[in-house]
Amino acid sequence: MPLTTMAKEFQLSVVAPDRTVFEDNVESVVLPGVEGYLGVQAGHEATIVALRPGIIEFKDNGGQRYFVSTSGGFSEIGGDKVIVLAENAQRSTEIDVAEAEKKLEEARKALRGEASTMTTDEAVDELELAQVRLKAARLV
Amino acid sequence: MATLKQIRQRIKSAKSIRQITRAMKLVAAARLNRAKMRVEEARPYAEKMREFILSIGGAGELPNHPLLERREVKKALVVLVTSDRGLAGSFNSALIRKTAEYLKNGTVPTALACVGKKGHQFFSKRKYDVVYNLSLPTAGAGLEHAVELANYLRKAFETGEYDSVHLVYSKFYSPIRQEPQIVQLLPIEPPTSAEKAVDGPSKEYNFEPAPAELLGLLLPKYLLTVTYQALLESAASEHGARMTAMSNATDSAGKMIDSLTLTANRVRQAGITKEILEIVGGAEALNG
């Protein structure tokens, strides 16, 4: 019997610096930790973890999957709730694909050494974020 | 005594002033609502951030980090957050007064960084050393502005250019109450665990990566959060102050119109009475 069908729910809050992206009960969540992906279900050991750019994936009790792209952040995992502080967090349904593609192209140009207002570090961050967003948008 | 024509002219200008101040009040009210919403939306993140740092601190002493480093203060920096526009009552002047007072009482050489035009104008006119100036768009401070400011402050502190950074901004309590505040930004004062007692006993956490490394990632974000929060509060305060100021101005214009109308009516009545007297006088003269 798959474990997920009997998993208990817990509260998940995904907050960006300027808004709350998601807040509700979920069954499981997968976080892009700096030391690898982390799957979390109710009753997980208390952990504080730093996140790298990637996709936060979670599932509600109806089995519906959601995706949130982020450029990194932190997460506090407690027994009955998980808090994610995510920079540049966007729900996959909110992502503007055209804009992300434009950003990706700009970042690539900057990295190729073409004239750009971005520094290399900024370009790398932009590139990563745009890639993550495009990936999340495809997952919807 | 002013002629009837002059008084009517003044009533007309008072009316157009009232129209403008009323419009400004409505605009400020709308902006205030938006600004308040943004303060509230940003609050959960800021609160969680504090809790995180507390949780890490709870695992023992906070590890060393450049942003926590306390040095002997040889040169200090003050960041003054004002608005770009005036007509907001005593909003800007209260902030400027507080800053000027602080600078006067300071014992070490202090440089000034300004966010918003008003503070910059005031201090640069007085030949003060303004080392950094950030102008905000009319739509209000965005996260990117906070990022810019926080990065600048961090660099200035880490390179040892300044040994402490304080922030002067207006804290928002209500549309009619804002207060200038001075807070220390750098070195970061870790939130004290006294506030934590409310949260109940602290849990034992696993850390990934190790606490010291985690803190290195967290602290710059914490600085950013505090900065962002201050910019948002300042925006809300500005709109609140402007709304109150414009509301008062509208009321005063109304009172002025009332009293001018009364005077105008009296002058008109006096004129009519005088004319009647003249006619009656003339008729009497003819009859006599």
Image (tube, coloured by chain):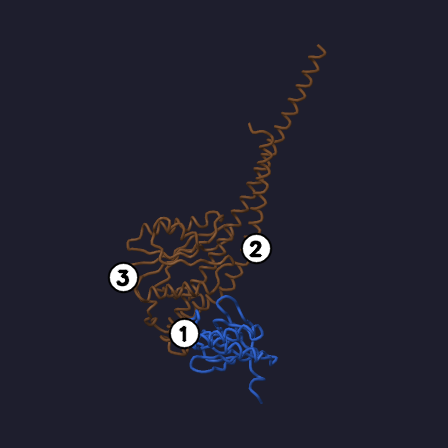
Chain colours: A blue, B brown
Q: List x then y, in percent, for residue A114.
A: 43, 74
Measure how far apart labels 1 and 3 are at the Cα level: 35 Å
Tell me, yes or no, if residue A107 can be seen here: yes
Above or below residue B160? Residue A51 is: below
Q: Which mark is residue B30?
A: 2
Callout 2 crowding tier (Cα within 10 Å): few <14, some 14–19, many ≥20: few
Measure how far apart labels 3 and 2 are at the Cα level: 46 Å
Q: Amino acid at mark 2?
A: Ala
Q: Earlier in the sequence, mark 3 or mark 2?
A: 2
Q: Amino acid at mark 3?
A: Glu
Q: Tell whether label 2 touches label 1 (CB within 8 Å).
A: no
Is B10 left or right of B146, judged from the image as shown? right
Above or below residue B241? Residue B205 is: below
Measure how far apart labels 1 and 2 are at the Cα level: 40 Å
Q: Amino acid at mark 1?
A: Thr
Extreme residue toward the bottom, this view: A1
Instruction: Pick the quarter of the image with the C terminus of chain B.
Output: top right
Tell me, yes or no, if residue A48 can be seen here: no
